[in-house]
Amino acid sequence: MAATRAATRVLVLNSGSSSVKYQLLDMSDATRLAVGLVERIGEQTSRLKHTCLTTGDLREHSGPIADHDAALKAVAEELSRDGLGLDSPELAAIGHRVVHGGLFFTEPTVIDDEVLNEIERLIPVAPLHNPANLTGIRTAQALRPDLPQVAVFDTAFHTTMPESAARYAIDPKIADRHRIRRYGFHGTSHAYVSRETARLLGKDPSEVNVIVLHLGNGASASAVERGRCVDTSMGLTPLEGLVMGTRSGDLDPAVIFHLARVGGMSMDEIDTLLNKRSGLFGLCGDNDMREIRRRIDEGDEEAALAFDIYIHRLKKYIGAYYAVLGEVDAIAFTAGVGENAAPVREAAIAGLAGLGLAVDPVRNAVRSGAPRLISPGSARVAVAVVPTDEELEIATQTYALVGKND
């Protein structure tokens, strides 16, 4: 009789309001078996893109996918075609990205009714994300009710912030009543990148202080002291902090009052302006850094100003978090812009030699998918590019938890 293979696979699900991203990983050696995306759920033009990495097969389907239930059933069917189905005894758990865990969830958590209820109670502070995350969880539970489902929270890594960093300077009774505080986001990325940066330096995370710059369409910075987050740029929502693709980042709160009272804008209109029509897009009409750099090279002054505003805010946070940490061992750039836009990295570090920061132009120009240093060998503070891997981080945390509970 053949021996039963161990359950070492984890399916990672990232459910958005109209999309589901997924990856299937084998945690015995952290290899990816399949990856895919279902987008435009609920539309006639829905699309599923699936890649089986064990065979190299790429399949794409277009046509209406009514809801998340239909989307996950379609994903399960594609995985089954590759011999990787959800009914496999090798599947140990499903790990779900959940954006907002508040203060209640400080670590990955096996999902039960109490956990679902708390995620639902947090919807008022994450109205765009938590409902979609809940839908994905409930659909997956219906497909495999016997399988452990684990929630990994974007906010969890930032729950180590001291109250001096997490509190806003408003009446604490009002703040507590309405759960108003700085939570931070992109936590799985900041956790992974800070740890990988320490590894790149040949040190344990408990030995280094790192400033992580997660620069994608959404962007955030964190100050990580000896493996623990002590400050981060996003706040109650992902709107606070750095200039982003379509979000304004830091803003005088009175701007909102002014737009309402003088501009006659509704709260919904202001919300849309600040979240979807601001940032780089609001400044120059583009939120793709590659296009902005192309326009700058052609002499476009509007694009150049947008880039300068973006870099100015980035420098402010580098300086602020240098002060928060006192000593810095490394600055790590990650995510789409951070990993690929050499001009952004160069401009963000330019003029900071007094802080021990410098970028080697030759190293910075190298394109690679591997973690690497881009600072000169003589630099007092390392400057690194560390590709993020949020799916691997979610799978790692999920598998560690399921293993603990076995």
Image: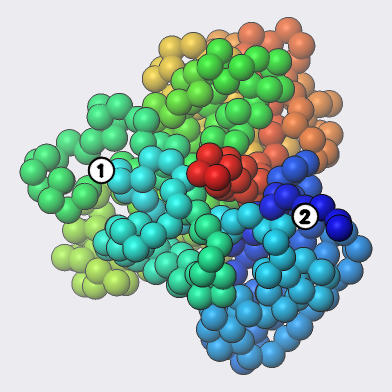
Quadrant of the rendering where the C terminus is positioned: top right
Query: Disc number at residue 181?
Result: 1
User: Which residue shows up at 24% across the image and 72% down it?
Assistant: 266
Q: Nearer the viewer, residue 104 or 403?
A: 403
Look at 61% across and 17% down and name the residue there: 204
Find residue 179 and report its horizontal and vertical position in percent: 21, 50
| Residue 231 position (above or below residue 114) | above
Quarter location, residue 343: top right
Q: Amino acid at mark 1?
A: Arg
Q: What residue do we see at 43% from left, 57% from top?
A: 111
| Residue 4, numbered circle | 2
Which one is in front in this view, the residue at disc 2 or the one at disc 1? 2
Quadrant in the picture for the N terminus: bottom right
Quick one: label 2 or label 1, which is nearer the N terminus? 2
Q: Secondary structure at mark 1?
A: loop
Which mark is on residue 248? Answer: none
Determine crowd level at label 2: few under 14, some 14-19, many 20+ residues with C-alpha closer than 10 A: few
> Position of 84 compared to 163: left or right?
right
Whether the residues at callouts 2 and 1 have beta carbons within 8 Å, the answer is no
Kind of residue at badge 2? Thr
- Regarding residue 390, the answer to whether it shows in the image is no
Q: Residue at (26%, 54%) from the top-left corner? A: 255
| Residue 22 location (% of width, % of height) | 65, 63
